Amino acid sequence: MIIPKIDYYPPMLAGQFYHIYNRGNNHENLFYSHENYRYFLEKWQQYLTDYVDTYAYCLLPNHFHFLIHVKDFKDYSPASLSGKFRSLFPNYAEKIDKEEGRQGSLFQKNFRRKIVVTDRYLTELVYYIHANPQKHGFCSDFKTYSYSSYLKILEQTKTSLQKEYVLKWFGRRQEYLKCHHQYEPTQGWPNWILD
């Protein structure tokens, strides 16, 4: 049986949902302190919110995941969005290099992305992104993890995170909670969702 090769670098087309992820070079940490997580999200907002809507995210010590939707507007081009990512990552890496006295690439070259092609994928991806800290042993219960959108989606405060859309996608707040409370750490993940 021939297994089709997954394209981890499809063009970032307007109007499409994507799972974006990357890790530290040589599996090194990307985040060392609370301030690092906050700064990365601040830079994400600065460089990318004009181009993408963010629906879910999780920042872990050595990697990150985002579910985004590329905005559709008149002058959009995949190259312009790629340029924003090329600005974000070095800007963040420069700060970490200075703080940690490190040299060399912080991120693995070329962040990966997968286009979200089905409703099922979108639903399971939100869940997968939020469950990631527990999956990798960074916490015992992902519902208490500070650096993901799981709790942010439930907050009433106004942010650029597309929390209302996510809650409507699951049906309502209670269904969102119910889906996330069904998590089983030993559960296997489908091949199409794994990083």
Image (spheres, rainbow, N blue to C red):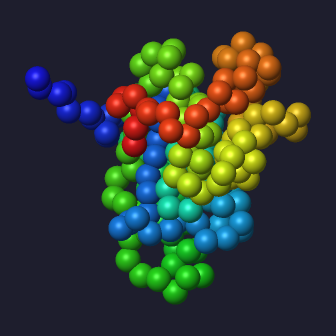
Pinpoint residue 19: horizontal percent, then vertical percent.
Answer: 47, 35
Quarter of the figure with residue 172: top right
Q: Is residue 189 visible?
A: yes
Q: Is residue 133 left or right of residue 82?
A: right
Q: Nearer the viewer, residue 52 or 120?
A: 120
Q: Is residue 71 left or right of residue 159?
A: left
Pinpoint residue 48: horizontal percent, then vertical percent.
Answer: 58, 45
Q: Is residue 43 visible?
A: no
Q: Nearer the viewer, residue 124 or 67?
A: 124
Q: Looking at the rendering, in which quadrant would you find the C terminus? A: top left
Q: Residue at x 34, y 53 (%)?
A: 110
Q: Looking at the rendering, in which quadrant would you find the N terminus? A: top left
* Name of the residue lying farthest toward the left: 1
* Name of the residue lying farthest toward the right: 156
Pinpoint residue 156: horizontal percent, then vertical percent.
Answer: 88, 34
Q: Residue at x 37, y 60 (%)?
A: 108
Pinpoint residue 15: horizontal percent, then vertical percent.
Answer: 50, 22
